[in-house]
């Protein structure tokens, strides 16, 4: 009877936690979470998602921060045979190292200081469903070995207990790091990497998705307009061009934040989007062509030679002289200086 009562309490606790997680999921569903875009890069990723979703294979999703890795994980779960069961999300980077084991696997009452009651871990809650381990590259090394054992044996052990609990969980992991480089640097276990990397899916950066930028911005604009009580029909042509020209280091997350801010500030039916930090974050590759287009080749050569001469105090010959730095014979440099009209009194402009 005592054992049966304990099992009932465990099931009650699991149901309570599942209910709590489902409330979070319902809130997420109302937050406009779906994949938008028609670019070839995104279509490749979506095709991979559709191929792997019906299976129980472990999936490793990679991509820059803000590319929608959690959305992809939810789509895999939605299309899987486990769709009626919960998907449990664990952000490995957000959990303190000393608590992550308890969060994942649970603990028994009195197993450590502060453990005043039994705790059901996320793997146990996700039984028959899916667990999404976000930012898996942040997981401490000492816990990686325990996770590997769980993945291999499909069993967990609560902290403070010697009883093994069978689980049936589909694992999806994600990271913005290059895990193989982390393995080479000794920060990630090679055996765990190979166990997670059964079916890798890479999500493209927003800057590589072309007109998807406009599709995502328009889709989210309409959602935010309803949310904030605005009547907005379109994005202005100038703003659309700005969106396409910008590099988007923060990817979809950055775009959505910018669109929502612009919607809140908008008081017409056409959305104007300003990217105040676009100029500051422009890459050198974007700014150099405009500079070179303003000068002829001779002018660029003249300016470069003058800069080197200034650095060498106008010393042409000898060690560390201008000719040596430029990789020219002294006579060749002197000939070029004469041809370009460079002399000691030449103004450097």
Image (cartoon, rainbow, N blue to C red):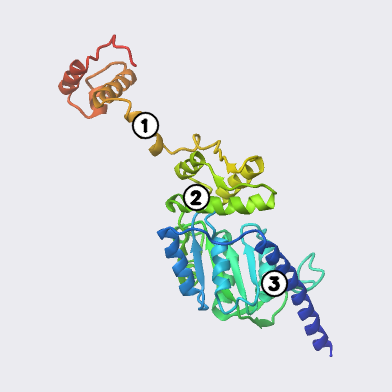
Which sits earlier in the primary sequence, circle 2 or circle 1?
2
**CA–CA distance between discs 2 and 3?**
41 Å
Residue 281 image position (x, y, % from top left): 49, 38
Is 316 positioned to the left or the right of 123 in the image? Answer: left
Q: Which residue is mark 2?
A: 214
Q: Which residue appears at 50% of the width and 76% of the height?
A: 57
**CA–CA distance between discs 3 and 1?**
57 Å
| Number of marks in picture | 3
Q: Which residue appears at 64% of the width and 51% of the height?
A: 224
Q: Looking at this view, is 220 or 338 the one in front?
A: 220
Q: Which residue appears at 47% of the width and 66% of the height?
A: 46
Q: Is residue 281 visible?
A: yes
Q: Which residue is mark 3?
A: 121
Image quadrant of residue 41?
bottom left
Which sits earlier in the primary sequence, circle 2 or circle 3?
3
Say few, some or many: other residues with alpha carbon within 10 Å of mark 1 (under 14 / 14 to 19 / 20 or more): few
Residue 158 image position (x, y, % from top left): 70, 75
């Amino acid at each position: 009877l005592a054992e049966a009562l304990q099992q009932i309490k465990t099931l009650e606790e699991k149901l309570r936690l599942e209910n709590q997680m489902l409330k979070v999921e319902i809130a997420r569903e109302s937050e406009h979470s779906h994949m938008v875009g028609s670019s070839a890069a995104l279509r490749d990723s979506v095709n991979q998602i559709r191929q792997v979703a019906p299976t129980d294979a472990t999936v490793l999703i990679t991509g820059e921060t803000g590319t929608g890795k959690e959305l992809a994980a939810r789509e895999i779960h939605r299309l899987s045979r486990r769709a009626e069961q919960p998907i449990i999300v664990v952000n490995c980077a957000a959990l303190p190292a000393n608590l992550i084991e308890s969060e994942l696997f649970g603990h028994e009452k009195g197993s450590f200081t502060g453990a005043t009651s039994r705790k059901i871990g996320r793997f146990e809650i996700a039984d028959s469903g899916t667990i999404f381990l976000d930012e898996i590259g942040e997981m401490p090394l000492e816990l990686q070995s325990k996770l590997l054992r769980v993945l291999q044996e499909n069993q967990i052990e609560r902290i403070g207990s010697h009883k093994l609990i069978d689980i049936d969980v589909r694992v999806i992991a994600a990271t913005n790091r290059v895990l193989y480089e982390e393995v080479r640097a000794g920060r990630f276990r090679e055996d765990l990497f190979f166990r997670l990397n059964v079916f890798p899916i890479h999500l493209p950066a927003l800057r590589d998705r072309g007109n998807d930028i406009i599709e995502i911005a328009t889709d989210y604009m309409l959602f935010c307009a309803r949310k904030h009580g605005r009547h907005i029909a379109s994005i202005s042509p100038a703003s659309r061009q700005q969106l396409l020209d910008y590099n988007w280091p923060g990817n979809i997350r950055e775009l959505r934040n910018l669109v929502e801010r612009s919607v809140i500030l908008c008081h017409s039916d056409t959305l104007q989007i300003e990217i105040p930090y676009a100029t500051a974050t422009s890459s050198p590759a974007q700014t150099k062509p405009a500079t070179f287009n303003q000068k002829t080749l001779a002018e660029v050569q003249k300016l470069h030679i003058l800069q080197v001469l200034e650095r060498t105090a106008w010393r042409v010959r000898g060690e560390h002289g201008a000719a040596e730095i430029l990789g020219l014979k002294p006579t060749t440099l002197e000939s070029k200086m004469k041809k370009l009209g460079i002399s000691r009194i030449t103004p450097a402009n």
